[in-house]
Image: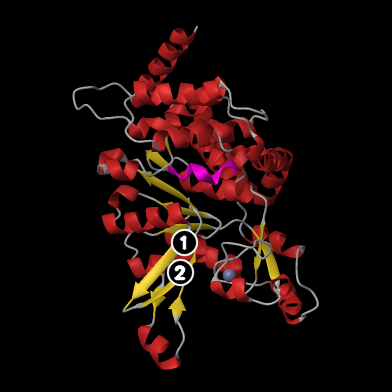
Amino acid sequence: MPSSSTSAARVGAAQVTPPKSTAVRKSKKVATTTGASPQTIADAQPVFPFTAILGQEEMKRALLLNAVNPNIRGILVLGHRGTAKSTSIRALADVLPPITFVAECPYRCPPEKPAGLCDTCANAKPRAKLPTLVGRVPVVDLPLGATEDRLCGTLDIERALSQGQKAFEPGLLAKANRGFLYIDEVNLLEDHLVDVLLDSAAGGINIVEREGISIAHPAKFTLIGSGNPEEGELRPQLLDRFGLMAEIRTITDIDTRIDIVKRRLAFERDPVGFRAAYEPAQTELRTRLVNARDRLDAIDVPDNILRFIAKLCVALEVDGHRGEITLLNAALANAAFEGRESVTRDDISAVATLSLRHRLRKDPLDRTDGGEKIRWALEKLDKDVS
Ligand SMILES: [Zn+2]
């Protein structure tokens, strides 16, 4: 598993313009540079293929659903160390279609979009002529011990006042725009940083204010936190703000463990050959994700499904409406991924535990697993209906 510091640096490195593109940048006639860039970036850092990851189905499904529908608002992954969390996120980013972004923009603004751009890109005239690059969806690691400045960026007030301009040095939230921000051991992160992260992830914008000067920039990313519940409790109000919660466990099946190690070894010995072997499966998954994203807004939600979701949340005594909304968004993503035209009862079953288990009230005397309670509630509702 890559260490946090090198991974964070790698995101920066991924933005380095390949020589070919530098030439294109100077030429004002060529607006886009689709072509060699994604290959250049991908080949520099071979990523373990998503379709070669064994086990951890819950986490993988949660990642895929977030990729289909960003309104799900992130994932909290709870479980043991060394269970392919970081590998899986990088693998997911690798299987997603590359993004086109403004070459000079630290936030990788999408030039084709009319809204959600940084001030510089939004005011560029004509915007269609901005030089662009194509690259992999960014994955940014938040290192433990990172400061708020590192996360949000810094505003140099002296320079801003003396030179009459906003002197802003973007932070990790800028790098994560349009991608994933991964926090290992989120339960060890200071509360105020977690709040900043959750606010940005929810609003899609980062605002830095100092001495009456403020700057805002797009920071739309999927937040993925991981933690080991044995190493520190997570505040309930924090739990509730992650869309899904996936549990991962160390795999105890001997044959599966052997296969995991074999695949890892094969990848380390020959990453290019290993990736080539999985390319058909990767292409199939990529196509499925793209189709699911395209279809998402057209998926129908029948009234009886809305009623079922509401009844389920009432039966489980889930406070507020966030649980219901997340459950619906996850069910929509699941229906789209499965190629359905409307949300079905199967979609609810597939995502109910992921969407609700971290929103259940805690009874200190009750040792029942959250997933178990949700399954009982689903079965009971089914009996009532039939
Ligand atoms: Zn921009």
Magenta stretch, residue numbers: 68-75
Q: Is residue 35 left or right of residue 338?
A: right
Residue 248: in sight, yes or no? no
Quadrant position of residue 344: top right
Q: Is residue 192 left or right of residue 217?
A: left
Q: Position of residue 14 (x, y in %)?
A: 59, 65
Q: Position of residue 184 (x, y in %)?
A: 39, 50
User: In 3D space, how far apart are the residues under numbered discs 1 and 2 (Cα atoms)?
Assistant: 7 Å
Which of the pair 355/142 is nearer the observer?
355
Which of the pair 301/242 is nearer the observer?
301
Looking at the image, tell me whether mark 1 or mark 2 is earlier in sequence order.
1
User: Which element carries disc 1, helix, strand or loop?
Assistant: strand
* In the image, residue 304 above or below residue 19: above
Q: Position of residue 47 (x, y in %)?
A: 60, 51
- The three-letter code of the residue at mark 2 reads Ala
Residue corresponding to mark 1: 205
Residue corresponding to mark 2: 216
* In the image, residue 170 above or below residue 344: below
| Total numbered circles | 2
Quadrant position of residue 42: bottom right
In terms of image quarters, where does ligand 1 lie? bottom right
Residue lying at 56% horizontally and 42% vertically, measured from the top left: 69
- Which residue ends up furthest to the left in the rendered image? 365
- The three-letter code of the residue at mark 1 reads Ile
* In the image, residue 312 above or below residue 138: above
- Which residue ends up furthest to the bottom in the rendered image? 162
Q: Check if mark 1's residue and mark 2's residue have beta carbons within 8 Å.
A: yes
Residue lying at 25% horizontally and 30% vertically, measured from the top left: 362
Which of the pair 88/300 is nearer the observer?
300
User: Which element carries disc 2, helix, strand or loop?
Assistant: strand
